[in-house]
Amino acid sequence: MNDDIVNAGDYLRKGKTMTPEDEQNVLSLLLNEGKSKELALEIIEKHKKMAPKEKKQRVIEKPRFELQEDIAGKIMTIPPPLIMLVMDNATVEEMQEIIGHSPIRLKAQAIDTDEGMKILFKNPKLLKNYPRKWKCKSIYIGGLYVAYNYCANADLVIALQSRKASERDQLIIAELEKYLKNDEKYFIATHLLELDDCKHQDGDKKIAIDHFRQLLKKIELMDYNIILTTDHPDHDGSHEYLPYFEIIKKM
């Protein structure tokens, strides 16, 4: 018996090209499956009249990773401990300045925070489904509006407010650092506004970029997988793509 053929279907697929040896082999396999000899012979005779068929190759498709809405699915494959830094209104070029590398470019589907947070968190129920899969706790650290409307299903929600985006980001980072020192495995998502604020207030966005670089260096010293992305790259649809970047230390 051919070692490459492990079931009766592989022989029967040969149809008219079955040899007498093939017929004996498939008969033996069909009898082993519990079929009567009469039924087995009937099956063989039927297939001997048929044209040969090629065995279908099983194709395993890779998950799509082209659109903003694909980010949540990608995150679900990355184990904890995991930090997700959502940098509001960051373009591909600005992310490249922060990380020093070219990020992955994904088709942007949102032009404001509401749309972006629905895609990242609310629609896929990311902060609820991720801890279910990986048996960990999810934490959201950010502003009150996003926390209430899009991230309330996290295991722990830390909502912070301040008059200045830069001050609020520092409060977020201070809270984040508390959990980085903890040995428990978390999925922590943060929403940082300083870059967006600089753009709207005609501030120096290089200051925000430097702050993000410093934060990234701190996190890189920890035993965390890291994701950097944005909720939207602009407010007018002028940027077709948004950035995604990951640093994977544990799989």
Image (cartoon, rainbow, N blue to C red):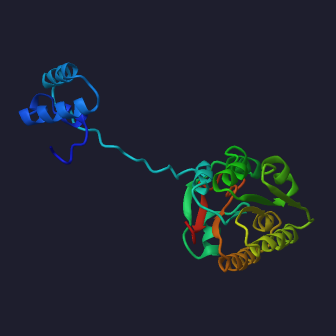
Left or right? Give the position of 52 relative to 62.
Answer: left
Q: Nearer the viewer, residue 157 or 42?
A: 42
Residue 7 vs 165, above or below: the answer is: above
Residue 73 vs 167, above or below: the answer is: above
Q: Is residue 236 visible?
A: no
Q: Residue furthest right?
A: 163
Q: Nearer the viewer, residue 1 or 204?
A: 1
Residue 122 in the image: x percent, y percent?
73, 46
Q: Quadrant of residue 100?
A: bottom right
Left or right? Give the position of 196 relative to 43.
Answer: right
Q: Is residue 73 visible?
A: yes
Residue 173 in the image: x percent, y percent?
80, 72
Residue 220 in the image: x percent, y percent?
65, 77
Query: Which quarter shows the C terminus?
Result: bottom right
The residue lying at 68 percent from left, 47 percent from top is 119
Q: How many marks?
A: 0
Q: Quadrant of residue 182?
A: bottom right
Residue 133 vs 211, above or below: the answer is: above
Q: Residue furthest left?
A: 20
Left or right? Give the position of 5 relative to 149.
Answer: left
The residue lying at 40 percent from left, 47 percent from top is 60
Residue 176 vs 121, above or below: the answer is: below
Query: Which quarter shows the N terminus?
Result: top left
Residue 120 in the image: x percent, y percent?
68, 51
